[in-house]
Amino acid sequence: MCLNVLHSNLNLFDSLNLTSHEDSERMLKNHSANFSTACIDANLFPPWFSQFPFKGPSKYPQEHIIGLSVDCGFYSIAYMDAWDGLHMKDFDQKTVIEYKKIVAYKIYHSKLNRICPDNDTVRVSPKRQKKN
């Protein structure tokens, strides 16, 4: 879900294409109403979001469901990167796979990862050793 303040509309991106247009509108109206209430409670900027129309690109990249899908979160990241508020840049499954690799790398090498061995002892694949 995207509360598009820049272009005064609401967007929903469903990577699995499982949500009907009516359900999408209902969810977006609920979301904008709740966000408006939170803005009023926090004394933030004017909460006019509940009047935003439901808009969005008619076509955007979606998952090809084969068995169990686990990529919807990565598609969300890709949507945030590719959506400028009016147009969705095209991307494909390879882009989502690259996001997965980047996230896995960052999690593994994070200072917060207490299970990961010291970086000095992390093995490098033979393929990468040849490059160095």
Image: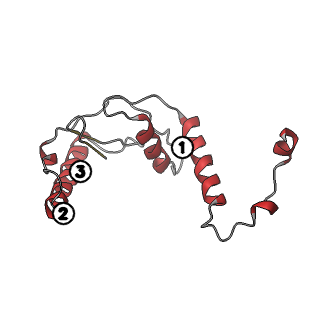
Position of residue 60 in the picture relative to residue 6 (left or right)? right
41 up-or-down from 76: above or below: below
Quarter assignment of residue 122: bottom right
53 up-or-down from 47: above or below: above
Q: Nearer the viewer, residue 14 or 85?
A: 85
**Which residue type carries mark 3?**
Met
Badge 2 element: loop
Where is residue 117 shown, x and y percent of the image? 74, 67
Where is residue 127 shown, x and y percent of the image? 83, 42
Disc 3 residue crowd, few under 14, some 14–19, many 20+, Cα 10 Å: some
Badge 1 element: loop
Write down the residue under mark 1. 66
Disc 2 residue crowd, few under 14, some 14–19, many 20+, Cα 10 Å: few
| Residue drawn at point x = 46 percent, y = 48 percent | 72
Q: Nearer the viewer, residue 63 or 125?
A: 125
Mark 1–mark 3 Cα distance, whole angstroms, equals: 26 Å
Which scheme is used to colour this image of the protein?
A: secondary structure
Task: Give whichever of discs 1 and 2 has the lower sequence position.
Answer: 2
Quarter assignment of residue 119: bottom right
Which disc is residue 27 wearing?
3
**Which residue type carries mark 2?**
Ala
Q: Give the mark toward the camera: 3 or 2.
A: 2
How many labels were placed on the picture?
A: 3
Q: Nearer the viewer, residue 71 or 128?
A: 128
Write down the residue under mark 2. 42
Mark 1–mark 2 Cα distance, whole angstroms, equals: 44 Å
Image quarter (top left, top right, bottom left or bottom right) of the C terminus: top right
Mark 3–mark 2 Cα distance, whole angstroms, equals: 22 Å
